[in-house]
Amino acid sequence: MRKESDNRTPSTVFEGMTSIRAVLSAPKTNDRKIIRILFDGTKKEARRKDLSYLSAISEKNGFDIIETDRETIERITTGNTHGGIIAECTGRTIPSLDETAPVKNGFYVMPDGIEDPYNFGYAVRSIWAAGADGIVLPERNWMSAAGVVCRSSAGASEMLGMLGTADPAGACRFFKDYGYKVVCAGIRDSVSMYDADLRKPVFLVIGGEKRGIARSVLEEADVTVRIDYGRPFRGSLSTASAAAVLSYEILRQNR
């Protein structure tokens, strides 16, 4: 097995059937392709249904299925939940903001300042489940470690649309031009998320728990919202937790 530190290095190895199915289910969302499937020959019987399914679609999707041994699988994986089956994939094209237009009356999120690919994946999982139409990636993001992100997001990262930008403040202006309300998570001059109008179209910006959101971005906000706690607490929620709480409040207000 690769070292845990390798989770932070570029990788397009997708581990386990949940991740593999996500890649296969996302042709409308992204252009990533499976190059080949590797599986542990000692698990052939246990994986019979999965291998039968993959074999049936392999020619159409242009990938090979290769039987190998456990040691080979372990050398190129970082997790231990792959179940003896992995996919080596191509990269994914992340279009820039100026190459597309947001959906009408939509909901997009920009999670910034996340410190590792696992937490990024956890945030993406919640954002996807809450019904967001897409994520806007800051210049520093974790999609280079796509396999880890896919695994920690339960496949959501492959199915959720993603746009790239190097300028968070510019992203706010971009969405404003399309009639979106820009909502930033913060404390200063904020209102409770329960009192804010979070009806779509909404562009939500969430900063890291250490650095928060840059002043230049906050100046673009139509409203700054805070998450009220149930008791006195001086700490900040993780970005992944804040993404879940705020995304579901947006879902609630748009039922």
Image (tube, grey):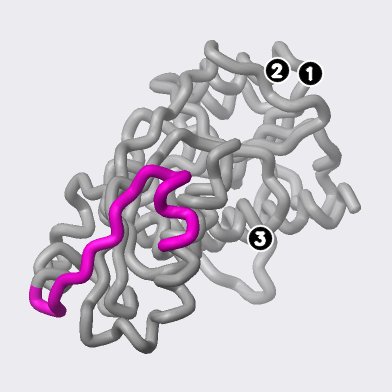
Callout 2 environment at 10 Å: few (<14), some (14 to 19), or many (20+)?
A: some
Where is 121 relative to 181, above or below? below
Label pair 1/3, CB-CB below 8 angstroms = no
Q: Amino acid at mark 1?
A: Gly
Label 2's element? helix
Q: Amino acid at mark 2?
A: Lys
First along the sequence among labels 1 and 3: 1
- Quick check: 255 left or right of 79? right
x then y, percent, for residue 222: 72, 27
Q: Read off the magenta span.
A: 55-71
Q: Residue at x 36, y 61 (%)?
A: 118
- Residue 83 in magenta? no
Q: Which residue carries the number 3 mark?
A: 245
Q: CA distance from mark 1 to mark 3?
A: 24 Å
- Quick check: 142 left or right of 76? right
Q: CA distance from mark 2 to mark 3?
A: 23 Å
The label shown at residue 176 is: 2
Q: CA distance from mark 1 to mark 2?
A: 5 Å
Label 3's element? helix
First along the sequence among labels 2 and 3: 2
Image quarter hosting the N terminus: bottom left
x then y, percent, for residue 236: 49, 60
| Viewer-proximal residue among 79 and 44 | 44
The residue lying furthest to the right in this view is 255
Where is 215 relative to 238, above or below? above
Q: Residue at x 45, y 73 (%)?
A: 50
Q: Which residue carries the number 1 mark?
A: 179
